[in-house]
Image (tube, rainbow, N blue to C red):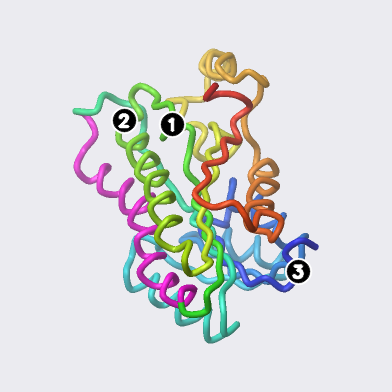
Amino acid sequence: MRLKNKIAIITGAASGFGKGIAEKFSNEGAKLILVDINKKLLKNVAKNLSQDYFVADVSSNDNFKSLLIYSYKKYKSVDIVVNNAGITHNPKPMESVTEKEFDKVFNVNSKSVYFCGKYFVPKMKKSKKGVILNVASTAGISPRPKLNWYNASKGWMITATKAMAIELAPYKVRVNAIAPVAGQTPLLKSFMGGSSQGKIKAFLSTIPLGRFSNPQDMGNAACFLCSDEASMVTGAILEVDGGRCI
């Protein structure tokens, strides 16, 4: 019960890493508001965990503002925000990525963190407490060919995490990130550029521990960084990647 009675918001919680983080946080006693754009999947996850949910597009200013209003109306305070929602473009040469694809990747992966800062940070600064966890990627540390602008969006998130951490430290607000390697999530096929056994085997050969990240790995790492056990940890980028970035 390391998160007992902590109020936590988790974006992208309907599937993949977000779902794994939600399950772990729920088991550790947190009170959750699960956020996703996919209402059907989100509703099922929330029901199974007996937790609350809020349907939102995290790249929308109005949606994020509505999330803030809903959260504080329901719980009066928020202890943790996990910025997990993310997307990628299909692997392709950088000049082949359309402007629409580029904008979508940065709006979901980066602008959502900006909105978190715009709406939730002032409340945390005022109360002088809070934890923000950004879900980055090993792609932001060791970029992969043909995932060019996705790599860049996750590199942005890593720098944003450190910038937020140093600025918010005087207010006792901690900001960290986890950097998973490609995982067993709905995005895996997009990362791989297909799901052939050859492509999967080739990528696994680059991970020293020999397997993909899974939602449980992310839940465990996120739980530690968002718990009081990590009270002296801020600005950290925790690689949960089986040694991929060594």
Q: Which mark is residue 148?
A: 2
Amino acid residing under circle 1: Ile
The magenta segment: 96-125
Q: Position of residue 18 (x, y in %)?
A: 58, 52
**Residue at horizontal 38%, vertical 75%?**
65
Farthest residue, direction front: 170
Amino acid residing under circle 3: Lys
Indicate left or right for 28 with 46 as reference: right
- Estimate the spatial distance between the alpha carbons at disc 2 and disc 3, rounded to whole Å: 40 Å
* Mark nearer the N terminus (3 vs 1): 3
- Estimate the spatial distance between the alpha carbons at disc 3 and disc 1, rounded to whole Å: 33 Å
Q: Relative to residue 104, is residue 10 depicted above or below?
A: below
Within-10-Å neighbours for mark 3: few <14, some 14–19, many 20+: some
* Mark nearer the N terminus (2 vs 1): 1
Q: Relative to residue 14, is residue 183 depicted above or below?
A: above
Q: Which mark is residue 4?
A: 3
